[in-house]
Image (cartoon, rainbow, N blue to C red):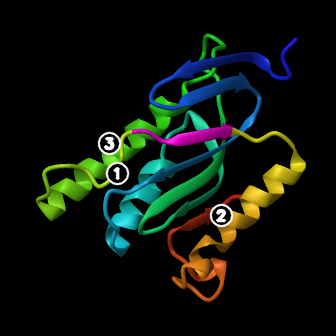
Amino acid sequence: MSRWQNFKIWRGRLPHWRADEVTYYVTFRHRRELNEVEVNHLLRALLKPTRWDVSTLCVLPCATELLCTIKHSPNGEAYELSDIVEKAKQKAGKEIIKKSGEKWPPFYTESFDRIIRDEAEMEEKWQAILASAVDLELAKEPEDYAGLYVSGAPA
């Protein structure tokens, strides 16, 4: 018997585990460092989708990390996490391309995601996301970094 409801695995270049009523840790790298305006574009694009609830999100110049839960469609099925992430990256990428004149968006196409297994892992990921801008010396305190969004403490 599975540990999670409706558990399944699918594979792109990386294996992706899916289940209902879980929290995911998601991260993806950027092809190049983002400037402040680009960080803001990506932050807004990731917070806009109504198909998920983002509890913690940090868009750094070189990578993005977040904790989220996925909502269900009107027919009761959970939305696909990778679709939400990729559509947000595409939206931000189009804005960035328009302003920068680049040929390609500054994000790699696939993201790494992981189901959070327990409270200890949730706390570890949450603290790491909060500390990431400080660790990279982008801010003295987490709340000073404009690319950080926190809706609340880990559950």
Q: Looking at the magenta stretch, what is its main secondary structure?
A: strand
- Tag 3 near tag 1, CB within 8 Å: no
Q: Quadrant of residue 136?
A: bottom right
- The secondary element bearing badge 2 is classed as helix
Which amino acid does the dot numbered 2 rest on? Ile
User: Viewed as shown, does residue 35 lie left or right of 10?
Assistant: left
User: Going from the N terminus, do you reach mark 3 or mark 1 first?
Assistant: 3
Residue 3, image x, y percentages: 86, 22
Q: Nearer the viewer, mark 3 or mark 1?
A: 1
The magenta region covers 110-114
Question: Earlier along the polypeptide chain: callout 2 or callout 1?
Answer: 1
Q: Amino acid at mark 1?
A: Phe
Above or below, 116 against 120 in this view is above
Q: Secondary structure at mark 1?
A: loop
Question: In the shown orientation, is residue 28 left or right of residue 117?
Answer: left
Q: Is residue 28 magenta?
A: no
Name which residue lies at 76% across and 41% down: 116
State whether residue 128 is above or below residue 55.
below
Q: How many marks?
A: 3
Which residue is at a point 39% across and 37% down the rendered structure image? Answer: 87
Q: Name the amino acid, label 3.
A: Gln
Residue ID for mark 2:
129
Position of 120 with respect to 54 (left or right) is right
The residue carrying mark 1 is 107
Q: According to the image, label 3 marks what residue?
A: 90
Please say if 82 is above or below 94: above
Relative to 132, residue 63 above or below: above
Give the residue at the far bottom of this rendering.
140
Mark 3 vs mark 2: give the one in front.
Answer: 2
